[in-house]
Amino acid sequence: GNSVTQMEGPVTLSEEAFLTINCTYTATGYPSLFWYVQYPGEGLQLLLKATKADDKGSNKGFEATYRKETTSFHLEKGSVQVSDSAVYFCALSGPSGSARQLTFGSGTQLTVLP
Amino acid sequence: GAGVSQSPSNKVTEKGKDVELRCDPISGHTALYWYRQSLGQGLEFLIYFQGNSAPDKSGLPSDRFSAERTGGSVSTLTIQRTQQEDSAVYLCASSNPGSGNTIYFGEGSWLTVV
């Protein structure tokens, strides 16, 4: 079945540091890949997505590239801000014709210090 | 509506009582999902509805859990004879598989069983 493995947290960085949160997956076929973010006290929000190999999703300075050869979708940001403190979830959904529900990683807590 | 709407946002119930959680998906979205997020853990898939097809109930943890979706829109998740381990945030999400299938989440219903 499908599975997602995320870098374990918590991660603590200083403001303006470079961020990488690793995510690898196991899936049949060609899934779509997502990063969701959950800010303190709020619901899950879609951060970015990629639907096919070599696609790069980007939003709010965050980027992730769909790497089929390494089955990875690592999240990166060049310069984090205090407001980026949140829990980040990597997820995948099945390709067309298969189960469409998301399979989530366990989440990575990010804290950015001023 | 503009987003996925869930109610109640918070619910405290006594062990052994039944609870109902409601989800109103984004207008036009044919797919609806329920997930559970327990404290300090990732998201656990519960059930998936797509149009008029039979729901995928493979994630329901026990027969105390059930869900229905009336008229292809609003959904109700029912937990009978609640136990303390049912305490979690119950997240509803919806998507339109015919249009990119990005899954949008509500803010969740925080359930506490005492």
Image (cartoon, coloured by chain):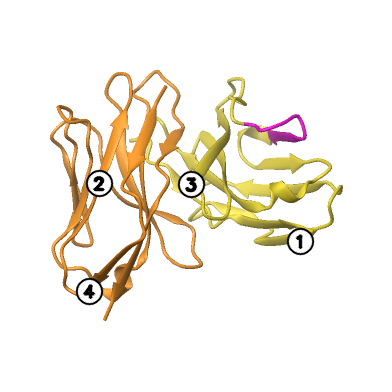
Say which residue label 2 marks. A22
Q: Nearer the viewer, residue B52 or B44?
A: B44
Real-space Cα separation, disc 3 to disc 2, in angstroms: 16 Å
Which label lies toward us, 1 or 3? Answer: 3
Real-space Cα separation, disc 2 to disc 1, in angstroms: 37 Å
Measured as percent of width and height from the top left, residue B22 is found at 68, 48
Q: Check the image and name the residue furthest to the bottom.
A: A114
Q: Callout 3 environment at 10 Å: few (<14), some (14 to 19), or many (20+)?
A: some
Q: Nearer the viewer, residue B75 or A2?
A: A2
- Image quadrant in which you'd find residue A80: bottom left
**Callout 3: SS:** loop
Q: Callout 1 environment at 10 Å: few (<14), some (14 to 19), or many (20+)?
A: few
Q: Please tell me the colour of chain A.
A: orange
- Kindly identify which chain the residue marked by label 2 belongs to: A
- Kindly identify which chain the residue marked by label 4 belongs to: A
Q: Is residue B9 left or right of residue A41?
A: right
- The reply to whether label 4 and label 3 mark residues of one chain is no
Say which residue label 4 marks. A14
Q: Are marks 4 and 3 in contact (CB under 8 Å)?
A: no
Measured as percent of width and height from the top left, residue A21 is found at 25, 52
Q: Please tell me the colour of chain B.
A: yellow
Q: Are marks 2 and 4 in contact (CB under 8 Å)?
A: no
Q: Nearer the viewer, residue A8 or A62?
A: A8
Q: Which residues are magenta?
A: B60-68
